[in-house]
């Protein structure tokens, strides 16, 4: 959502804030009568099977199987806690709030929760947030034996972090979670039982700030910056990716794309470099490392979004798209050196955008993305023809750190969109029905995946946009038994 663009050289902070506030507010409400089936739709490919269904907006609605399984949210995120409970959040737009769901049966059914941040969900909602949403679960249980759930959302003026310490039954809010006000595209990651950190762009400097809380999100008192002094040339030329914390080493990883060196700051150069900021002091300071620098300066990885995940051995995986193909690199030494890029997508996904990943046991990696069989190297997805059919693709590699290893790839959903897909935030002139990101998580108890995604079918319009689920019910797994 919002802007997701490099800061213009020489632009003043006021101009940036005005640009941000000009964005739409923004998700068109969907109709409960638009004709969606309340039953799940089964999609099978090879050994894999996924159950697909829409989620319900009203608290207490269980989907699939209810006539209330309809919503008007988009751009969702998902995580699983250590017990195998899945949590999903999805945004309704600036000042309109966030929807949330949970599943305690491995993703087969999801129950709608009270909104993490809406003041009056039943009346349509007013909220201190509702923009870009991200979600995290604590790796360790709290004093009551429950894993805290954190939902971050954006108000532009600041970042709102909502915390549930009772499994999503109730929420507390900190509407000033960012210590630097005036913000864009926040991310969130949890550590231990009560530590949680957020990252975001501040509009004044376009730095990537990282704030940490040690009291379950009640207050954020620690501020670090992911772009270190040696790489200050990246300040005006970067696009933020997500934030992740290794629960074993407690190292914090912030990924982003940008230019490659200081000389390029004065040139019209694409974001042909992928970077990662690494903190080993709990988020107080970061050291930046290049993940991959493409020698072709016209290639750009500045698309929504560079993604990082970590397996149980501490191997770090970064997944990134050049707007047509999808690649990953991995590091076994805490982000200092990298192997890659290694292409992930294969036919029939000739184009692959908006990736998300989840890693588990050593070497095990699941990746999802929006993909289509249409491909034109000289055409951005924004300008793809109406015949381009987009699906959610799922790929799995059980030996992702092994030389010559391969992914098994399947489509996990029916068609979710036809035509162009714009990734330029508020600069978009084309279709934004798929918005900017979506996610996948894996149950550590079953090893099966659950994917949450945006879908504008059957009408292929913004008024049909909604958040849906694809839960794996058969096929190879990761995590379980390890």
Image (cartoon, grey):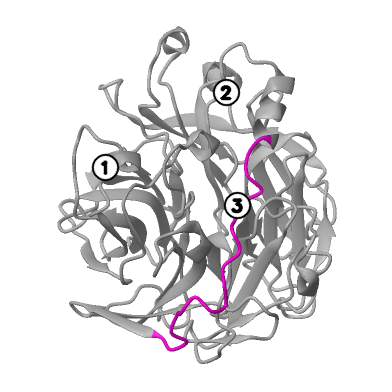
Residue at point 74%, 66% (across, down) = 116
Q: Secondary structure at mark 3?
A: loop
Q: Residue 457: image x %, image y %?
A: 40, 67
Q: Position of residue 231 (x, y in %)?
A: 53, 20
The reply to whether callout 2 and callout 1 are in contact (CB within 8 Å) is no
Label 2 and label 1: CA atoms lie apart by: 24 Å
* Residue extent of the magenta highlight: 22-40
Q: Secondary structure at mark 1?
A: loop
What residue is at 30 percent from the left and 28 percent from the top? 299
Question: Tag 1 or tag 3, which sits nearer the N-term?
Answer: 3
Q: Is residue 34 magenta?
A: yes
* Residue topped by disc 2: 7
Q: Quadrant of residue 124?
A: bottom right
Question: Dot 1 surroundings within 10 Å: few (below 14), some, or many (20 or more)?
Answer: many
Residue that badge 1 annotates: 324
Q: Position of residue 375 (x, y in %)?
A: 19, 45
Residue 324 or residue 218, whichever sits in front: 324
Residue 300 belongs to magenta span? no
Q: Determine which quarter of the picture holds residue 113.
A: bottom right
């Amino acid at each position: 959502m919002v802007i997701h663009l490099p800061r213009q050289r020489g632009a003043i902070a006021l101009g940036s804030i005005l640009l941000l506030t000009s964005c739409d507010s923004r998700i068109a409400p969907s109709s409960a009568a638009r004709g969606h089936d309340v039953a799940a739709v089964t999609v099978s490919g090879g050994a894999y099977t996924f159950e697909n269904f829409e989620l319900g907006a009203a608290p207490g609605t269980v989907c699939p199987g209810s006539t209330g399984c309809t919503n008007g949210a988009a751009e969702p995120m998902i995580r699983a806690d250590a017990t195998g409970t899945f949590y999903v959040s999805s945004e309704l737009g600036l000042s309109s709030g966030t929807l949330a769901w949970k599943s305690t049966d491995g993703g087969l059914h999801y129950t709608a929760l009270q909104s993490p941040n809406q003041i009056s969900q039943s009346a349509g909602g007013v909220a201190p947030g509702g923009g870009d949403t991200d979600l995290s679960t604590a790796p360790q249980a709290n004093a009551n034996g429950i894993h805290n759930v954190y939902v971050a959302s954006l108000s532009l003026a600041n970042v709102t972090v909502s915390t549930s310490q009772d499994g999503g039954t109730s929420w507390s809010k900190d509407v000033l979670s960012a210590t630097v006000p005036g913000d864009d595209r926040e991310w969130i990651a949890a550590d231990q039982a009560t530590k949680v950190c957020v990252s975001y762009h501040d509009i004044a400097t376009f730095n990537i700030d990282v704030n940490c809380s040690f009291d379950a999100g009640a207050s954020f008192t620690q501020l670090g910056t992911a772009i270190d002094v040696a790489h200050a040339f990246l300040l005006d030329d970067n696009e933020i990716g997500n934030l992740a914390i290794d629960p074993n080493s407690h190292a914090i990883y912030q990924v982003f794309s940008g230019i490659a060196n200081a000389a390029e700051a004065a040139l019209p150069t694409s974001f042909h470099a992928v970077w990662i900021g690494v903190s080993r002091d709990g988020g107080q300071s970061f050291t930046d490392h290049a993940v991959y620098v493409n020698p072709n300066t016209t290639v750009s990885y500045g698309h929504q979004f560079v993604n990082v995940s970590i397996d149980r051995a501490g191997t770090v995986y970064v997944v990134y798209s050049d707007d047509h193909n999808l690649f990953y690199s991995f590091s076994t030494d805490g982000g200092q050196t990298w192997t890659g890029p290694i292409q992930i997508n294969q036919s029939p996904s000739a184009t692959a955008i908006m990736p998300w990943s989840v890693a588990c046991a050593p070497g095990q990696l699941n990746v999802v993305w929006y993909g289509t069989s249409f491909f034109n190297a000289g055409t951005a997805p924004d300008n793809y023809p109406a015949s381009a059919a987009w699906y959610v693709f799922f790929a799995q590699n059980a030996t992702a750190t092994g030389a010559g290893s391969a992914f098994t790839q399947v489509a996990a959903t029916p068609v979710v969109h036809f035509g162009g897909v714009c990734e330029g935030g508020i600069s978009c002139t084309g279709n934004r029905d798929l918005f900017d990101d979506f996610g996948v998580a894996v149950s550590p108890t079953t090893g099966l995946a659950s994917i949450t995604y945006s879908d504008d079918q059957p009408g292929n319009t913004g008024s049909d946009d909604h958040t849906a689920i694809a839960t794996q019910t058969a096929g190879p797994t990761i995590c379980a038994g390890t």
